[in-house]
Image (cartoon, grey):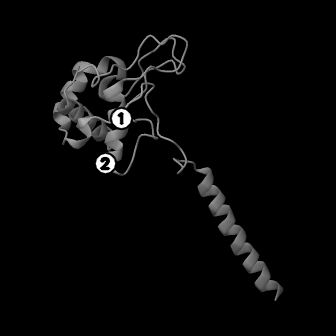
Amino acid sequence: MMRFNLKMLAWFLGVLILALALAACGGKTATEEPARPSNPGGTGEAVNLKGDPVKGAEIFQANCVSCHGEEGKGGVANPGSEDGEVPALNPIDPTLVSQDAKTFASNIDLFLEHGSTPAGNSPALSMPKFGDDKMLQPQEIADVIAYVIQLNQK
């Protein structure tokens, strides 16, 4: 009987240790909220359009690379911001990623539509309101979204 209890205890402790190890690995939890832009607003028309990542790469090169770096890899200084750098888009903030393509696109779209001012005393760089200010058309925003999603699938 004692041998059975020791085996049962060892099995239980093994499962408990495995569960704790998996929990410690982190990752996005169900309660972790996605990052949101500082400027309010909902998604735009672009989330309902099919984006072309090849065209999106061209638009990104013309409008986004100066702040987000080549292929969105970041490393661009943003003095006065809390983080000190413009956020990388490759890899993108993990709270924006979703297995659901429309949710992933919507999370990116909010920033493209409404822009965002980073936390900090006086950030030198802020995300422009590409949609609100009509700097990009909805199809162009959809193309950039497709490109950013593609960058994060590599």
Q: State the residue in front, 91 or 37.
A: 37
Residue type at tag 2: Ala
Q: Which residue is mark 1?
A: 42
Q: Residue placed at 63% from the left, 62% from the top?
A: 18
Q: Residue furthest right?
A: 2
Question: Residue 58, image x and y in percent?
Answer: 18, 26
Question: Residue 19, image x and y in percent?
Answer: 63, 62
CB under 8 Å between callouts 2 and 1? no
- The image shows residue 10, relative to residue 40, as above or below, that is below
Quarter of image, res 92: top left
Disc on the earlier residue, 2 or 1: 1
Question: Residue 85, image x and y in percent?
Answer: 47, 20
Q: Residue placed at 30% from the left, 40% from the top?
A: 149
- The image shows residue 151, relative to residue 6, as above or below, that is above
> SS of the residue at dot 2?
helix
Quarter of image, res 76: top left
Looking at the rendered structure, the number of numbered marks drawn on it comes to 2
**Label 2, residues with CA under 10 Å away: few <14, some 14-19, many ≥20:** few
Quarter of image, res 66: top left
Q: State the residue in front, 146 or 34.
A: 34
Question: Residue 140, image x and y in percent?
Answer: 19, 30
Q: Residue furthest front?
A: 41
Q: Which residue is mark 2?
A: 101
In the rendered image, which quarter contains the C terminus? top left
Residue type at tag 1: Gly
Residue 8 appears left or right of 28: right
Q: Residue placed at 51% from the left, 16% from the top?
A: 81
